[in-house]
Amino acid sequence: MRIALLGGGSWGTALAIHAARLHQDVVLWVRKDETAERLNRERENARYLPGIPFPETLSITADPGAIDDADLILIAVPSGAFRETLRWMQPRLCEGQTVAWATKGLETSSGAWLHEIAEEELGTDFPPALVSGPSFAAEVARGQPTALTAASQSGRSLDQLTGALHGEALRIYRNPDVIGVELGGALKNVLAVATGIADGAGYGANARAALMTRGLAEMQRLGEAVGAQPGTLTGLSGLGDLILTCTDDQSRNRRLGRLLGQGYDLETARARIGQSVEGVETARQISARARALSVDMPICAEVHAVLYQGRPVREAARRLLERDPTHENPAG
């Protein structure tokens, strides 16, 4: 199997390292020639994953031809670059190739789900397929145990993803619920910002647990509105990823929230993180979708207000606490 990974950030590099431990023909595509030259020379991604050497079977290139004879093309670029990546790929794609992604989030400009973008740009010849779940790039790159969900309604795409990634320390579970897996991977970033804000403000473990639990309820309400399967949202790509990103400071979204809770403004917090923080843009898009679908998502709404309306953290907390009492389970 020939595998092409697109994206030289931490996640794309980590997946390429893992795949190259399992397969003899793996290429990591990056945008710039100088980046490819540096990675090939140093044999590690010192910017994102310092100290983790590349397997000998991993090659790095900036040549778009890297995808031409790949059996599986796995995209791991930021969500804002997802459509652009598909557009340059599309003329080079051939029948029989599988296109999948490990990107999380929604499109910045339109708020579209990534599977919607894939369908618009690639048509029906390449069924939507993705991999998601609780995973920090450095742990995957170091070969620490991890479990992820591969989602597609195409059995062939699931076979390709499983064949490429399942092995050694990484276990793959299969799921046909593309929208549910996408939703969990996107929304958990917003909720990680929320729990980070609470921890940065010193609100304590009780508040963190409440935000995670009620955040899951918001995920489930939005999931019901868009047709996700309930079991998906309590699986690896929903609850699993939520737990991970809300409780560990390897999460950039959580770290950004902590800085906001400590009083830093958004621009300064983003600069201190120094990498893409998907939850910032996702908060805007998720809030817009919730309003359009009349889905009650108060935690996400307050995160949006803190990020984009300048609402003080303590006011956002007060607004959540002063909401009218309600049933924990509205069906009850």
Image (cartoon, helix red, strand yellow):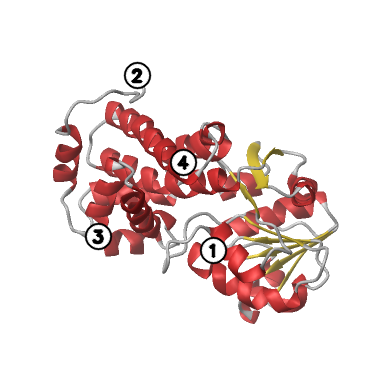
Q: For residue 37, which quarter of the picture?
A: bottom right
Q: Residues within 10 Å of mark 4 (few under 14, many from 20)?
A: many
First in sequence: mark 1 or mark 4?
Answer: 1
Q: Amino acid at mark 2?
A: Gly
- Residue 110: image location, x then y, percent: 42, 66
Select label 3 or label 2 by which is in front. Answer: 2
Residue 185 image offset from top left, x and y in percent:
51, 47
Question: Disc 1 to disc 4, how far (Cα)?
Answer: 36 Å
Residue denoted by label 4: 223
The residue positioned farthest toward the top in the image shown: 332
Query: Where is mark 3, residue-wise?
Result: 308
Determine the CA span between mark 2 and mark 1: 51 Å
Quadrant containing the C terminus is top left
The residue labelled by disc 2 is 332
| Badge 1 vs badge 4, beta-carbon distance below 8 Å | no
Residue type at numbered disc 1: Arg
Crowd tier of the residue under label 2, counting other residues whose Cα lies within 10 Å: few below 14, some 14–19, many 20 or above: few
Q: Which residue is mark 1?
A: 47
Question: What SS does tag 3 mark?
Answer: helix
The answer, for residue 50, to whether it is visible in the render is no
How far, Cα to Cα, is label 4 from label 2?
19 Å
Marker disc for residue 309: none
